[in-house]
Amino acid sequence: MIDAYAEAFERFARNGGSEGPEEVLARRREAFAWFVRDGFPTTKDEEWRFTPVAPIARTRWRLLDKASSRTSGRDLEPFRIGPPGWCTLVFVDGRLDPELSVRPALPGR
């Protein structure tokens, strides 16, 4: 199973995941090395003792291709709160997506 995650991590790195501040990249590599060494946490790990992660570990995760991963406004509907005119800032892959965001003018402007 770890091999599938290692392959996905490499694809992620080739697909833009290796871009960014060196501190972030170093932490990302460090975190993945920890995962390869120890796997998913369990309730035997002190920090995770009240968090059952077995359902997460059993799920087969996969990266989406960049072309097929476009988020749409319909994808966001279950997560919206308040009326449609409220300010909503949507970040996709750490970047503000102006097409999905709602930024009404401030009063008096």
Image: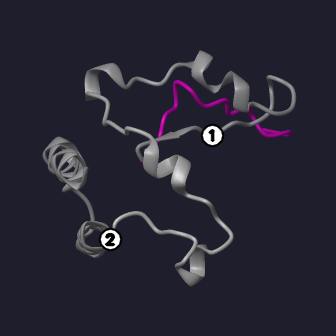
- Magenta-colored span: 94-109
Residue count near mark 2 (Cα–Cα under 10 Å), binned few <14, some 14–19, many ≥20: few
Q: Is residue 103 magenta?
A: yes
Residue position for label 2: 31
Q: Which of the pair 97/6 is nearer the observer?
A: 6
Kind of residue sitting beneath label 2: Ala
Name the residue nearer the viewer: 40 or 33: 40
**Quick one: which residue is furthest to the bottom in this view?**
46
Give coordinates of residue 51: x percent, y percent.
64, 65
Q: Nearer the viewer, mark 1 or mark 2?
A: 2
Which SS class for mark 2?
Answer: helix
x, y percent for residue 76: 63, 26
Numbered label attached to residue 3 = none
**Residue under label 1:** 89
The kind of residue tagged 1 is Leu
- Dot 1: element: loop
Q: Is residue 14 above or below residue 73?
A: below
Disc 1 and disc 2: Cα gap in Å? 28 Å
Q: Position of residue 8 (x, y in %)?
A: 22, 45
- Residue at (72%, 26%) from the top-left corner? 78
Q: Could you say which is closer to the camera, residue 67 or residue 31?
A: 31
In the displayed structure, does residue 38 sit left or right of residue 58? left
